[in-house]
Amino acid sequence: MPRRYGESEKEYATQNEAPSIVLRAGEGGVLRAMLAFVERTKAVWQGEGFALALESLSASGAIGVGWPMRLVLLVGACEALLLPDRRSGLQHAFVNRLACMIARDHAQVEEWAAWLRPAYDLRSDVVHGRPLDSIDDLTVLPEQYARDVGRVVIHALCRLVSHRMEHPAADSNADPLWRLLDRAPATASAFDELQTRLRSEHDVPAHQFTLVPRC
């Protein structure tokens, strides 16, 4: 909901009948955990390698940005973060790498991949000026789908930041993580090897997003 401005910040905080953000019971602890995570991983996400992705993510959440452009920005952020070593096969790599970053077990990988494919298809349709035929593949309204993709991307971003804290990479193109991500869809053991690599003392805090593929 658009912010309602008063004459001062105090008026916005104390007299706004429709605030932009509402915290429900129990969410204060979740917010504190996420803020602590952001603070302790600052050295990673403030680095040059994350600048473009964070700019895209910030723009995707701006008031007035429609769902088509939001998907373009979200997919672009993922390409910057998860595909720095790829110059071809981008759709396949986007779908599978992101699916493996968010799946809870190997059995979920293909479910997530199927759920994510329309995001890349719609992004390509918008960029190239084609009809948005992939809307027919969605099981929810496109506005809701774009919001859900945003949640998924944030979760994957946090896992990648944790990984970078644990395994600093001088050259992100040569990170062993990419090889593990590409192998993970094939077998349960390869998926488990990836998850072992991703585990970190800087693990992503539990948050309010329940990530379940809606295929």
Image: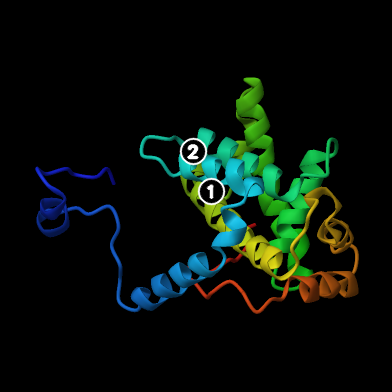
Is disc 2 surrounded by few (<14), some (14 to 19) or many (20+) residues within 10 Å?
A: some
Is the C terminus in the top left, top right, bottom left or bottom right quadrant? bottom right
99 left or right, relative to 149: right
Type of amino acid under label 1: Tyr
* Secondary element at image label 1: helix
| Nearer to the camera, 158 or 147 | 158
> Where in the figure is residue 207, as x and y percent of width and height?
49, 71
Tell whether label 1 touches label 2 (CB within 8 Å). Answer: yes
Residue plotted at (62% across, 51% down): 47
| Nearer to the camera, 210 or 87 | 87
119 left or right, relative to 40: right
Q: How many labels does the image show?
A: 2
Is residue 76 placed above or below 170 in the rendered structure?
A: above
30 left or right, relative to 9: right
| Residue 145, label in figure | 1
| Residue 213, label in figure | none
> Where in the figure is residue 132, as x and y percent of width and height?
60, 29
Residue, far top: 129
> Where in the figure is residue 188, as x and y percent of width and height?
86, 73
> Where in the figure is residue 93, as x and y percent of width and height?
80, 47
Residue plotted at (59% across, 44% down): 51
Q: Earlier in the sequence, mark 2 or mark 1?
A: 2
What is the distance, in whole Å, between disc 2 and disc 1 at their CAs? 8 Å
The quadrant holding residue 52 is top right
| Residue 67, label in figure | 2
The quadrant holding residue 27 is bottom left
* Secondary element at image label 2: helix
137 left or right, relative to 8: right
Residue plotted at (88% across, 58% down): 179
Residue plotted at (24% across, 45% down): 3
